Image (spheres, rainbow, N blue to C red):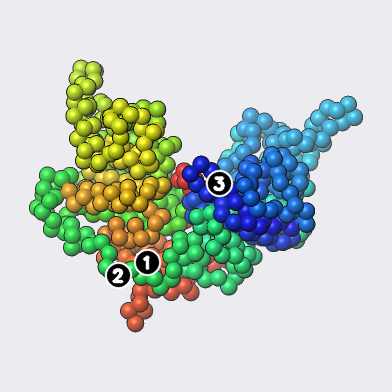
Amino acid sequence: MLSVTGLTKSFPGARALDGVDLAVGPGEVHALIGENGAGKSTLIKVLTGVYRPDGGEIVLDGAPVRFATPLEAQHAGISTIYQEVNLVPLMSVARNLFLGREPRGRLGLIDFGRMHRAADEALRSLGLRVDVRRPLRSLGVGAQQMVALARAVSVDARVVVMDEPTSSLEPREVRTLFGVIRMLRERGIAVIYVSHRLDELYEICDTVTVLRDGRRVHGGPIAGLERLRLVSLMLGREMGQVRGEGRTKFSHQHGSHQHGAGGPGGAGASGTHREPVLEASGLTLRQVLHGVSVRVRPGEVVGLGGLLGSGRTETAKAVAGALAPESGRVVVAGAPVRTGSTPAAIRAGISLLPEDRKAEGIVPGLSVRENIALAALPGLARFGLVDDARIDRLVETFMKRLRIKAAGPHQKVGELSGGNQQKVLLARWLAMRPKVLLLDEPTRGIDVGAKAEVQTLIDELAGEGLGVVLISSDMEELIEGSDRVVVLKDGAVVAELAGAEVTEDRLLAAIATGGAAPPPPDGNTGGNTDGIDGAADGTASANTVGDGGGHD
C-alpha cells in the first residue's frame, strides 16, 4: 500500500533521514520505533506533506507521490493521528470531526443536522458517547484523542499513521483503540504505529521498522523478534557486549573521599553510611508516574535508565517542582519540600538541567553573563538593586571553572556552540550552590570534546559531595557515569542496579523485560529474555508517559 525507498532529508547541520526504506501492505500494522533523534517524526512529516524530501521515492498504492501540503496527503488517503491533539478546542465536537469536509445542503450551507448525526454515529462506533454539539475543550484529553481518532478513520484513508496514540488514553480506551486498529486491518487499511511501549507493539503490530540516527537498522516481522534484541537495535548496543573496566563506583571512589570537605554533603562521613541528600518516594502522577522512588546520597551519581517515554524526564521534573505529583513526597537533606513548586525546590537546593536546553534552558537573546546570573539575581541584589560587581565576579568564576569558550561575558549565548551553551546552564545552577543536581541528557547534541568535559565535570561535582541524578539515552554514558541505576518502564520503577550489576546486559534485560535478571551460572551478565511483562489478559498497558520535550 505504501513504500518508501532511499528517503533522505537534511536540515542545516544535520541529516535527519539517510536512505530510509519502509514498506507496509494492505491490512498490515507496522511499528515504527526508535529513540530521540532517530528520525521517526521527520519520516512521518515527509509522508504527510509537512516536509519535502531531498531524495528518494514514495509510492502509494502503486503510484509515485510527493506531497506539497498535509492536505494533499490527506486527499491522497494518508491520515494522521498525532500525540498532541491537533484539533480546534473552541469548535464543537462535530465541527472538529468534519472540519474542511462539512456536509452541505442544496444552497451550499452546512447541514448541521446531518453532520451531528454522522458525528454521533462515528463516535459511538468507538465507544464514545458525548454530546457532539459541545465544544471540544469541554472533553477530557482522552476523549479528545478519541475524537481525533474518529476523524482520522472517518475519511477515506488508505494509510493511517498513529503517533503515540495511547499517550492520553485510559485502559478501556486503549482496548477500544486496538479494536479500531483491528477493524482497519480487516478493511485492508495500512497502519503505521509509533509507540515506545513494547507491550503495545507486540500485541497489535505485525511488522517493525527500527530507525537509529536517521537510518533504518532493522525491518521485518515482530513476532519472532526478542524484546532484548529489539531494545538493543533501538539503542545501538549489541547483546552480550559487556564493557570492561568502567568508572570507579560510589562505594569505592566516593565512599571515603577526602575532597568532600565543605561540599553540600558535609565532610568526613563514609559515603556508604551517609544519610540521603535526596529522598523522592511514591511520586504518582495520573497516566504518567506510578509510585516512583529515588534516593541519592551526597557524592553519589544515580542514573535513571529506560527507553524514551519511560518516565525519566517526568520523574526529574516532579522532583524539581516543574510537575505537580498527585501523591508522593520529596525530602532534601532531611527537610520536606513542597511538591509542585519550582521556587520551593530551588530554595531547598534542587537544580534541574532540562533535556531541551533551547526551549527550557537558555535565553538565546541574552548574554552569557545574564544567562549565568539569571537564577541567582535575587541573592545578588542589595535593597532591591542588582550589584553588578558581584555578578561580574560570579560570572568570571564560573566561566573559568567550566572553561566556557566565548568572546566574552557579553556575547549572546545563542551564538555559542551547543557544548558551551550547556556549560552556561550548568554554571547558572551551580551558582545557586545546590545540594542535588538533576541532569537530563546533559551531553545530547554536543561534540565529543565538550561531552568529555561535561562528563568530567559531573564526576568532579560528585566528588565535592553533590548528589547527582543522571538521565541519559547513551547507555555507555549511563553505565560509566553512574554508581547506581534506577530503571523505569511505563512510569514505574522495575529494577535497581548497583555496583557490579551496572552492566549493559543487565540494563538491557531490565529495560526489555521489566526486571533485572540474575546473571547465569557461567558468570555472563546477560539477562533472560523469556519473561514477558504484559498484562495477563493480553491487553496492553495504558500507562502514559510524555517524551520529555525531546525532538526527532
* Viewer-nearest of discs 1 and 3: 3
State the mark number for residue 244: 2
* Viewer-nearest of discs 2 and 1: 2
Q: Position of residue 313 (x, y in %)?
A: 41, 48
On screen, 468 above or below 344?
below
Tell me the residue at 26%/26% (across/down).
Answer: 377
**Disc 1 marks which residue?**
504
The quadrant of the rendering that contains the N terminus is bottom right
Q: Which amino acid lies under the numbered mark 3 shown in the image of this protein?
A: Ser
Q: Which amino acid lies under the numbered mark 1 shown in the image of this protein?
A: Glu
The numbered mark, 1 or 3, whose residue comes first in the sequence reads 3
Left or right, 392 with respect to 508, comes to left
Task: Give the total of numbered labels.
Answer: 3
**Disc 3 marks which residue?**
10
Q: Which amino acid lies under the numbered mark 2 shown in the image of this protein?
A: Gly
* Category of crowding for the residue at label 3, using alpha-carbon neighbours closer than 10 angstroms: few (below 14), some (14–19), many (at least 20): some
Front-lying residue, 412 or 473: 412
Q: Position of residue 240 (x, y in %)?
A: 40, 73
Q: Position of residue 242 (x, y in %)?
A: 36, 70
Tell me the residue at 74%/49% (across/down).
Answer: 65
